[in-house]
């Protein structure tokens, strides 16, 4: 064999053997399609309705009279989440049994608006509106209230919180007596 044939045979052998250096004649495996990345859950927005239960303490002053006691009640409302801010409206009804100098304060009903700052799972808010207070011997009368509160989501459907309100009814039912009340309440709301 001549040198030229030997070189040519070596080149042909090298070219035909090259795939064997790569590992195998089987096609290379295809990389799997990447799975989508799952992000941490985002706090549910505050938009939606709710119903709840209230349990609290009230301090009531009427002229020279002062009395205090506990109460329980119901609330319902609707909130709208605007991003950083939340606005809403609602109603509360509280059942009281507080003796104010022979006059029994029986209930308070509120029509309220609220606006607050969205903290994710928390909502810090201010509230105001109209209150109607019922006293067994004097009837009922309407005034106003203002206050503040905080609500915290425990789950997407349940939130807990607290609220402090100042109420005032001037010249209660024409009696010449101004009624002032401060309430502090713990609240649990069921959201839908």
Image (cartoon, rainbow, N blue to C red):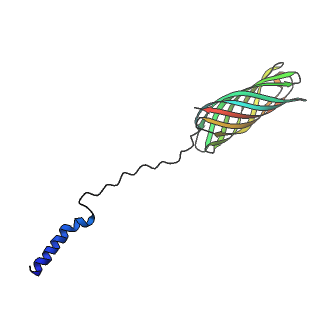
Report the side of 33 relative to 39 (left or right): left
Residue in view at x 80 percent, y 31 percent: 58
Report the side of 43 relative to 91 (left or right): left
Residue in view at x 73 percent, y 29 percent: 130
Work out whether 59 lies above or below 11. above
Work out whether 113 lies above or below 99. below
Determine the residue located farthest toward the left in the rendered image: 1
Residue in view at x 63 percent, y 35 percent: 88
Q: For this rendering, which residue is in front, 149 or 128?
A: 149
Q: For this rendering, which residue is in front, 88 or 71?
A: 71
Work out whether 134 lies above or below 120. above
Q: Quadrant of residue 189?
A: top right
Where residue 102 sits: x, y (%)? 88, 21
Please identify the quadrant where the N terminus is shown. Answer: bottom left
Please identify the quadrant where the C terminus is shown. Answer: top right
Determine the residue located farthest toward the bottom in the rendered image: 3
Q: Is residue 92 visible?
A: no
Q: Quadrant of residue 122?
A: top right
Q: Quadrant of residue 63?
A: top right
Report the side of 15 relative to 53 (left or right): left
Where residue 127 sits: x, y (%)? 70, 36
Q: How many marks?
A: 0
Residue in view at x 46 percent, y 50 percent: 37
Q: For this rendering, which residue is in front, 138 or 58?
A: 58
Where residue 67 sits: x, y (%)? 86, 29
Determine the residue located farthest toward the right in the rendered image: 64
Where residue 111 sits: x, y (%)? 69, 28
Q: Is residue 7 visible?
A: yes
Q: For this rendering, which residue is in front, 154 or 183?
A: 154
């Amino acid at each position: 064999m001549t040198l030229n044939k030997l070189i040519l045979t070596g080149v042909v052998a090298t070219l035909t053997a090259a795939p064997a250096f790569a590992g195998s004649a089987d096609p290379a495996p295809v990389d799997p399609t990447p799975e989508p990345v799952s992000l941490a859950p985002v706090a549910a927005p505050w938009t939606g309705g709710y119903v709840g239960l209230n349990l609290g303490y009230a301090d009531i002053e009427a002229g020279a009279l002062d009395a205090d006691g506990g109460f329980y009640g119901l609330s319902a409302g609707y909130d709208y989440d605007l991003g950083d801010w939340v606005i809403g409206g609602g109603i509360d009804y509280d059942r009281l049994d507080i003796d104010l100098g022979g006059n029994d304060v029986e209930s308070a009903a509120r029509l309220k608006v609220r606006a607050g700052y969205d903290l994710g799972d928390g909502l810090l808010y201010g509230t105001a509106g109209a209150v109607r207070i019922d006293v067994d011997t004097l009837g009922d009368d309407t005034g106003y209230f203002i206050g503040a509160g905080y609500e915290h989501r425990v789950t997407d459907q349940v939130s807990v919180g607290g609220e402090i309100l100042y109420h005032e009814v001037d010249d209660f039912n024409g009696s010449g007596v101004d009624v002032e009340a401060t309430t502090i309440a713990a609240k649990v709301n069921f959201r839908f």
